[in-house]
Amino acid sequence: MPISRFYKLYLSPNRKYVKVLKNLLGFVPGNLSLYRLAFRHKSVAQNIKKGVKNSNERLEFLGDAVLGSVVAEVLFKMYPYEDEGFLTELRSKIVSRNNLNALARKLGFDKLIEFDSKIMQSGRQGSLLGDAFEALIGAVYLDKGYDFTKNFLVNYIIKSHIDIHTLEQTETNFKSKLIEWCQRHSKDISFDVVTNEEGESAKLFTVQAIIDSEVMGAGKEFSKKNAEKLAAERACTALGI
Amino acid sequence: MPISRFYKLYLSPNRKYVKVLKNLLGFVPGNLSLYRLAFRHKSVAQNIKKGVKNSNERLEFLGDAVLGSVVAEVLFKMYPYEDEGFLTELRSKIVSRNNLNALARKLGFDKLIEFDSKIMQSGRQGSLLGDAFEALIGAVYLDKGYDFTKNFLVNYIIKSHIDIHTLEQTETNFKSKLIEWCQRHSKDISFDVVTNEEGESAKLFTVQAIIDSEVMGAGKEFSKKNAEKLAAERACTALGI
């Protein structure tokens, strides 16, 4: 065991935190402050300069990008005969907030993240877990570099915790996602078929997704069902769901 | 000079192509077939298996992700006191199709890309250049790894060809972008203020971006101008502009 590793694990004043991280991640972290930052939600962050807070949001930006790149390569090599549309869709399922939240919960991040407990009571926790997961990837990247982060993600996270083939089969249902969101936020939702424009094929359907009387997305397709799907997908995008 | 490099540049049957690439990229490429693939537009691609074409689109998917990650790190380190919203916006300007098309033209990609000349006559060339730029990043990544690609991008591309500080100042104007797009595609566009809902603050404005009688995006803000901007941005997203 190299002396620095021995020091970190057994002698350093931070040895408890180092052990917690080692158990979580499977490796001994270098720069601890990066990992502390990754687990600091904005609800407990403090201003450090010019209105910038020491929350995990900047690391999340970086980690999101590194994660996207690693997953892109994994899928690129795993599916040599699928086109970029397939790869893009499958990646977005893997890195979806739902999936990352569940993953972070499974890994026990809830015990590590610092946050103001009020946000839990108010139900505003949102994607606190998934965001921290991405921030952690940002921290690992800055601490250890790309190849290390890739190996960590592939061998420690993806192989053990993500079932890519199952995700491949599940279709993202934007309509039910949108309806669920509206129920949770007590909003009215309807899908209205709009009359065709003059000169337009009678076979085309235009559907608007209307939330609290506001058109949030519209889709035009050759079946009512597909037009609804498209309208729902666009409304999800517009609402950032 | 290592012998493999000497062979590639002076003896190999592909030495001409190797020299072209070396002049373009500043380094001697390893796996030439990756670079040929990066420069092959779908208009000249052939089916290789199960309906998959040997076009640059899969490499573009990979390169887009690697580029996003490298640019994220550059900005993360360049702007230590800006928040993730700032970083996200600035990155999207840097990797915008407009910017990448211009960059690829400047680098002389138009002489290297294989494509069916019919698509130029019909004006359907779209983002052929920018797409090939991303595909090239994918090729460099597979050929040489992440750190090499990052150095190449930072030292050969970003430092010489991208003026980040100028991009930082330019505001993306979604409204004029949308209007331009409608003019180019002969579509009517209007921004309509929708009457407030009952019980809603009189200070709120809801604006819909309506294209050929179809609502393509809506925004609600405390000024009419900002509501228009948001509606335009959402319509751009919905239309994939």
Image (cartoon, coloured by chain):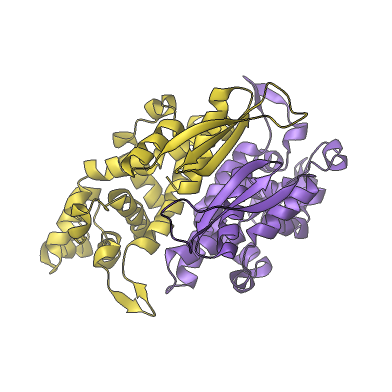
Chain colours: A purple, B yellow
**Residue A48, picture quadrant:** top right
Q: Residue furthest front?
A: A198
> Looking at the image, which residue is at 25% across and 49% down?
B25
Residue A20 makes an appearance in the image: yes
Q: Is residue B137 rendered to the left or right of residue B175?
A: left
Residue ranking furthest to the top: A50
Is B125 placed left or right of A153 in the picture? left
Image label count: 0
x, y percentage for residue A110? 80, 50
The x and y percentages for residue B159 are 33, 35
Classify residue B103 by image quadrant.
top left
- Residue at x-position 62% and y-position 67%: A171
Q: Who is closer to the viewer here, B70 or A143?
A: B70
Residue located farthest toward the right when viewing the structure as drawn: A121
Q: Residue at image x 73%, y 38%? A: A40
Q: Nearer the viewer, residue A206 or A122?
A: A206
Answer whether residue A26 is visible to the viewer in this image: no
The foreground one among A132 and B220 is B220
Name the image quarter holding the N terminus of chain A.
bottom right
Where residue B165 appears, as percent x and y from the top left, is 40, 26
At a point 56% along the width and 50% down the height, the residue shown is A218
Q: Is residue B115 above or below residue A126?
A: below
Q: Position of residue B154 (x, y in %)?
A: 37, 41
Going by the image, does A64 lie left or right of B179?
A: right
Identify which residue, B59 or B18, lies in the foreground: B59
